[in-house]
Amino acid sequence: MSARRRAVLSLLACLPALPVLTSCSTPAQLLLAAIPDGTLATLLGHFEKAATVNRQRVAELEHKGEWVELAKFAEENLDKDRSSAPWWMVAGYAYSQQKQHARAIQCFREMVRLEPDAPDGWNLLAQEHLAIGEPRRAISIIENALQILRDSPATLVILGDANSELRLHEPAARAYQQALDMNGGLTQAWAGLARSHIQLGRMAEAENIARAMDKSHPDLATAIRREIEGAKPR
């Protein structure tokens, strides 16, 4: 894991509103990080018309972390309907958690093919490439997505993350700012923007973000200030 990724995760680990990021130990745990609703809500949100028993089973297996069984359950349903984007999503997520990234990517590609106007497929596909250390590929996917999508701040957060991974901090800052212009409540975008400002030597801007976070996310504000201090010349 790069030094930049460790630093960003040290900021994001302070955010109680992001249930997906329960640990920073594996790349797969970055999956869905840019989707504000969180893992379970996102999965079940695609099953509004599904049978209750299927929704309950997905929720149960996800809660228990039984990824092999969740993948098997998704594949069984895909055998019945290969055009179901929600089941491709569940399968991809389950494979990602097992570090079967190639299979996860195949699943998310099917999501995009079936629902090109929906942001989740693009986001998951790009995030999977980012999680396995392919930020340039993630940027290419997001650029394609942004030609189709409208008003998708989560997609722009992933673009910021990918640019940051490549140490392209100015483009990263622009992407985070665009996301915040659409949704000022995205704490991940604020954390990413603060980190970009620090890397660009714009400490005053980073401090302004920390000050804005003092009441709503005091732990994040403290972490930003720690990053500012760590970046100062010795």
Image (cartoon, rainbow, N blue to C red):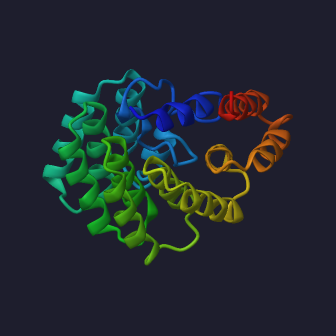
Q: Quarter-wise, where is residue 71 in the image? A: top left
Quadrant of image for the C terminus: top right
| Front-most of residues 163 and 234 | 234
Residue 136 appears left or right of 190: left
For the point 48% across and 58% down, the residue is 159
For the point 68% across and 59% down, the residue is 180
- Count numbered badges in the picture: 0
Find residue 199 and report its horizontal and vertical position in percent. Answer: 61, 46
User: Would residue 84 be seen by someone viewing this image from the given angle?
Assistant: no
Find residue 85 and report its horizontal and vertical position in percent. Answer: 30, 58
| Front-most of residues 1 and 150 | 1
Residue 209 appears left or right of 29: right
Q: Quarter-wise, where is residue 28 in the image? A: top left
Q: Is residue 173 above or below residue 210?
A: below
Q: Is residue 23 above or below residue 106?
A: above
Residue 216 appears left or right of 20: right
For the point 71% across and 27% down, the residue is 226
| Front-most of residues 121 and 23 | 23
Q: Can you name the residue that lies furthest to the left here?
A: 79
Find residue 64 and report its horizontal and vertical position in percent. Answer: 38, 21
Find residue 97 and report its horizontal and vertical position in percent. Answer: 31, 32
Q: Can you name the residue that lies furthest to the bottom here?
A: 147
Quadrant of image for the N terminus: top left
Residue 212 appears left or right of 156: right
| Front-most of residues 4 and 45 | 4
User: Would residue 30 be seen by someone viewing this image from the given angle?
Assistant: yes
For the point 32% across and 43% down, the residue is 133
